């Protein structure tokens, strides 16, 4: 049996040993509650402060702009629901919201939930490559208070022109612009300061996508943006996110952010070489690559072989100990096809064939050309199994 091959790094990443080492003391000897006033408590508190600075430096923000949460999903919900609550408290009115039709469910679902409670909500259409067109922002109602457009898509890897979009929104509206940077950070340059200058008021990042632990993430926000908490209690995180801090995870997240911002150009070049090799091989075998005409993350390839079901391919590869994902989604849209591909206008039958290969590009776990060659060899085995099966059937 060959060793397992993991090519699903957009789903999650293994923790970097350097990150783990930084975390361990806070799971063992230094277990004190950071709110405690004795020495060990103060040490834990200082460790959180240090992590906040590491996060801020890595994404070019001020430490006071960083709110730690337990996940990217929570950070997105805090922004959307927290802003909606603050707006309702201040004006008595419901927030009018908009987001790209290709957003992650943790942006789409809270917006739809608020729509159910009386908010206006618009989904911004995307072009066939998955890119939001600036004109659609101009067409939004003048009362739109919050727009969210992700920096890079988790399925296609398509990078959105967020700076331009935020600028367009700012010219025509007096609202807030948020961007989900969970997939972009560590694989694409991200500067909160530059985004903020362009009109972006909040950014989400998450630890487990950048070789940090699960259980730590951040909402980075302009302090002018008024939020109400979703979790009330002891008043941690400036009152915006109560609950005893997950010190070890936050410490690990800080180190992971530092490493995710380092050597980006070098890691990008390496990933681009592997991606080009992979996509060439896929095209030679008849695959269609989604979002091909847009700028994409260097680690993400979303493809389909016409006539071959994506889930079948994923499960046959799984039998060969190869881990990738399919574009299947059951939560919304037409059963079995990715809502992202549907929003891009991809033919339903082709969309059902989608598979996502996402390469590792963090310092300790890059997917080199050898991993890609191994993947293509296993893919060939599976494709010929399917051909033999089709010949018999
Ligand atoms: C684009 C994007 N946003 C948000 C999330 C949610 O992050 P988390 O897993 O930390 O909740 C994910 C996770 O897949 C994602 O890909």
Image (tube, rainbow, N blue to C red):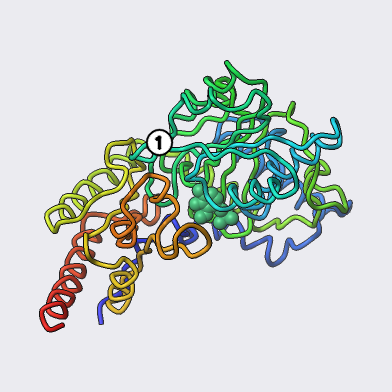
Query: In the rendered view, does 236 fall on the left or right side of 384?
Result: right
Residue 160 in view in this figure = yes
**Depicted 331 relative to depicted 80: above or below:** below
Closer-to-camera residue (335/308): 335
Q: Residue at x 68, y 51 (%)?
A: 113
Q: Quadrant of the C terminus?
A: bottom left
Q: Residue at x 26, y 54 (%)?
A: 368
The mark total stands at 1
Residue 212 in view in this figure = no
The residue wearing badge 1 is: 131
Q: Residue at x 63, y 59 (%)?
A: 215
The image position of residue 125, as x and y in percent, is 46, 38
The image position of residue 204, as x and y in percent, is 59, 42
**Depicted 294 relative to depicted 4: above or below:** above
Picture quarter containing residue 51? top right
* Neighbours of disc 1 within 10 Å: few (<14), some (14-19), many (20+): many
The image position of residue 70, as x and y in percent, is 67, 55
Cβ of mark 1 under 8 Å from ligand 1: the answer is no
Query: In the rendered view, does 155 fall on the left or right side of 2?
Result: right
**Depicted 16 relative to depicted 271: above or below:** below
Secondary structure of the residue carrying tag 1 is loop
The image position of residue 81, as x and y in percent, is 73, 45
Q: Residue at x 29, y 46 (%)?
A: 271
Query: In the rendered view, does 262 fall on the left or right side of 227?
Result: left
């Amino acid at each position: 049996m060959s060793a397992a091959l993991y090519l699903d790094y957009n789903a999650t990443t293994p923790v970097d040993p350097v990150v783990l080492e930084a975390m361990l003391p806070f799971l063992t000897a230094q277990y004190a509650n950071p709110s405690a006033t004795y020495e060990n408590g103060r040490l834990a508190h200082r460790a959180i402060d240090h992590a906040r600075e590491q996060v801020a430096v890595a994404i070019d923000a001020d430490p006071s702009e960083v709110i730690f949460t337990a996940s990217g999903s929570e950070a997105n919900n805090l922004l959307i629901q927290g802003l909606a609550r603050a707006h309702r408290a201040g004006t008595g009115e419901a927030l009018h919201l908009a987001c790209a039709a290709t957003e992650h469910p943790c942006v789409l679902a809270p917006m739809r939930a608020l729509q159910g409670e009386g908010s206006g909500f618009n989904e911004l259409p995307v072009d066939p490559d998955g890119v939001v067109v600036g004109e659609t922002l101009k067409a939004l109602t003048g009362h739109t208070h919050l727009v969210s457009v992700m920096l890079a898509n988790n399925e296609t890897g398509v990078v959105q022109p967020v700076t331009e979009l935020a600028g367009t929104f700012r010219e025509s509206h007096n609202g807030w612009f948020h961007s989900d940077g969970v997939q972009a950070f560590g694989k694409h340059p991200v500067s909160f300061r530059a985004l903020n200058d362009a009109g972006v008021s909040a950014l989400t990042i998450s630890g487990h996508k950048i070789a940090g632990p699960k259980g730590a993430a951040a909402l980075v926000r302009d302090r002018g943006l008024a939020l109400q908490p979703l979790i009330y209690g002891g008043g941690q995180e400036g009152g915006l996110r109560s609950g005893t801090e997950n010190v070890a995870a936050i410490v690990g997240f800080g180190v992971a952010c530092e490493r995710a911002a380092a050597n980006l150009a070098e890691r990008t070049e390496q990933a681009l070489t592997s991606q080009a090799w992979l996509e060439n091989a896929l095209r030679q075998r008849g695959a269609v690559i989604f979002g091909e005409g847009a700028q994409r993350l260097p680690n993400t390839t979303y493809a389909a072989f016409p006539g071959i079901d994506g889930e079948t391919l994923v499960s046959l590869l799984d039998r060969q100990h190869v881990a990738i994902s399919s574009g299947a989604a059951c939560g919304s849209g037409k059963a079995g096809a990715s809502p992202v591909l549907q929003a891009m206008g991809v033919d339903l039958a082709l969309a059902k064939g989608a598979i996502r290969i996402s390469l590792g590009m963090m310092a300790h776990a890059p997917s080199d050309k050898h991993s890609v060659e191994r993947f293509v060899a296993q893919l060939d085995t599976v494709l010929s199994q399917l051909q033999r099966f089709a010949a018999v059937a």
